[in-house]
Image (cartoon, rainbow, N blue to C red):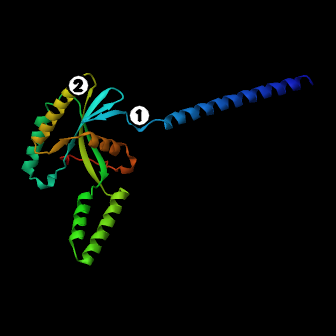
Amino acid sequence: MKPIIPIVMLLLCLICGGLTLLFLKKNSKRTKVTENKEQKTANEFVNVKDVKERYLYTRDGYIIMYIKINPISIDLLSEREKKLLCKTLTAELSSEQKPYKFLAVSRPVDISPLINEYTGIISNSSDQKQKDLLRNEMLVMSNYALSGEVVERQFYIMLWERYEEDIEREISKRCYEFKSKLESGNIQCEILKQQDIVRLCNLVNNPAYTNIEDSEFEATIPIF
């Protein structure tokens, strides 16, 4: 009986040592994975390889162009004008054979034009009460804009092609044709340039500007 006890103790020690070694290896692997994730750059995270002129190049081998659609209010249109707009856009876009994406993103309201206007009034005004009121209004509006509570919706069309040599000419032609189709329905739009593309990437990948969408739906004309 006595020789069995040391053997049992030795086996228990070996088992405990093996479990401890296995646990330490798992922890070291988890630490390495966490470090690799933290070392990823922003470009690697959002799949952006480069942005040049009007083109965005992705890491998985695509080239992308964006069209920004300027908002319109269909509440100002009559029923006849709404039906005509729908028919025009349907006829124009029905010829589009390649896939595209319609993006709707939220961004803080741009108050810079109004702030500039108020600043000009303050500098030219001699009424101290008016100046105080305008300064207070500017402060309140700035707080709203910085808090992200007041946002506006912006709409984009995304076109893409598999990257190959001289593909820029082909996707540019497609992008301008798509733009002309929208403008045939009196919808003003513009092709994004390098700085605007960077801003759009920030809007899409910045969680500070999210918006809760209404899950209810009904048959209606979408508002651009």
The percent coordinates of residue 52 (x first, y second) are 28, 34
Q: Nearer the viewer, residue 64 or 101?
A: 64
Secondary structure type for disc 2: helix
Crowdedness near tag 1: few (<14), some (14–19) or many (≥20) residues, C-alpha within 10 Å: few
Q: Earlier in the sequence, mark 2 or mark 1?
A: 1
Horizontal placement of 224 versus 144: left or right?
Answer: left
Residue at 11% across / 48% down in the picture? 82
Residue found farthest to the right: 2
Q: Residue at x 51, y 33 (%)?
A: 36
Residue type marked 2: Ile
Q: Residues within 10 Å of mark 2 (few under 14, many from 20)?
A: few
Disc number for residue 44: 1
Q: SS of the residue at dot 1?
A: helix
Name the foreground residue: 220 vs 127. 127
Residue 167 — which label?
2
Residue 130 location, quadrant: bottom left
Front one among 165 and 222: 165
Q: Position of residue 54 (x, y in %)?
A: 24, 36
Q: Is residue 131 above or below residue 143?
A: below
- Residue 190: quadrant of the picture: top left
- In this picture, residue 120 sits left or right of residue 200: left
Q: Quadrant of residue 199?
A: top left
Amino acid residing under circle 1 = Glu
Q: Distance from label 2 to label 1 (Cα)?
A: 23 Å
Residue 202 marker: none
Residue 9 percent location from the top left of the image: 84, 28
Quadrant assignment for the N terminus: top right
